[in-house]
Structures are given as C-alpha cells and as structure tokens.
Amino acid sequence: MIDPARLREISDKQPEFARHLGIRLVSAEQNRVEMELPVTMALSNRNGVMHGGAILRLTDNAGGTAASINLAPDENTVTIESKVNFLRPIRIDDVARAVAVPVHIGSTTQIWEITVTRGDGKVAARVTQTQMTLAWKDPAPAPAG
C-alpha cells in the first residue's frame, strides 16, 4: 500500500480534465489503482446512459495514474493504445468504478487491464491499455494565464 502522503500527492497531480469530469482517486498501490466517476446527465449519450467516451476517459486516467506510480521521477507516460469492450450500460445517477491492474510493467511499456463496474458490481467495460514510458527532452511550457 502506498503511504497516505504519496496517495495525496498522486491525487493532487490528477489532470485538470479528470477533475473537471469528476473523476476521483479511491486508492492507489503499485499494482492496483481504483477510481470512480459519478454518472451525470452531462456524461450521458443519446440513450440516457454513460457515454463510451466518458468510460474511456475514466479508464485512460486510471491506467495513466497506475503507470505513473511505476515510473522513475524523471519519466513520464503516454497512452499509445486502448482497446475496449463495452458489456453493459451504466445509468445516470450510478457510479462507474475503474480498477487498473498490471499485465506487464517493462522499462519502455506498461500494459494495464482496467475493469469498469457499475453500482451493482456488474462489469460494464473492460479495457486493455498500453502506456509508453518517455522522458521529455524539453520541459512542457507553463500554462498560460
């Protein structure tokens, strides 16, 4: 288990887009990351259930966070592949929960299996995601504003 200070640091460094959507880090360990996202009308599709893009955003954030935990301080990670199977709908006012576990953690790539469940515990989606490890040659520009 990651110590509480490290968990707060990981939680504080979540991307602004993830915060905007309402994604919340539930727990993080070296071999397991759990996040959740309340399903609101803003995240729905024309059928009144959670949009597939919102599910993928949740899983991308979970996989990216999990990969980041397993990097050296000077390394970063980017998603280079994501494969999804949508199995069941998640209705508005439910909570989507994503759990990422490693399939492979190497020096240049990591593969994560992310399972998304809904409030009744049934699996709604499964994602296999590949993250590439890199070290930026130039620092990222500071945000404007």
Image: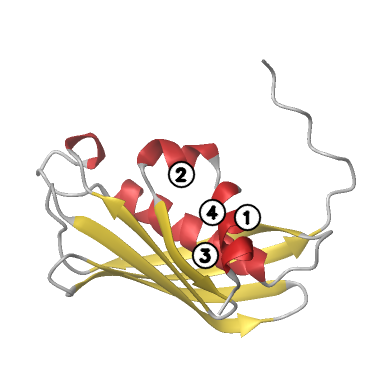
Q: Position of residue 63 (x, y in %)?
A: 52, 64
| Distance (Cα) linking label 4 and label 3 | 14 Å
Amino acid type, label 2? Ala
Cα–Cα span, label 4 and label 2: 11 Å
The residue under label 3 is 63
Which numbered disc, 2 or 1, marks the residue that appears first in the sequence? 1
Real-space Cα distance between discs 3 and 2?
13 Å
Q: Residue beneath label 2, please?
A: 18
Amino acid, disc 3? Gly
Q: Seen from this angle, which residue lies furthest top?
A: 145
* Residue labelled with disc 4: 11
Relative to 140, 88 lies left or right: left
Q: Position of residue 84 (x, y in %)?
A: 37, 66
- Specify which label sits upstream in the sequence, 4 or 2: 4
State the SS at label 4.
helix
Secondary structure beneath disc 1? Answer: helix
Q: Which mark is residue 59?
A: none
Query: Which residue was labeled with disc 1?
Result: 9
Q: Determine whether label 2 and label 1 are within 8 Å by CB.
A: no
Snapshot colouring: secondary structure
Tell me: 125 left or right of 134: left
Closer to the camera: disc 1 or disc 3? 1
Residue 54 vs residue 8, the one in the foreground: 8
Report x, y in % for residue 122. 17, 75
Bin the neighbour count of mark 3 within 10 Å (Cα to Cα): few under 14, some 14-19, many 20 and up: many
Q: Residue at x 17, y 37 (%)?
A: 41
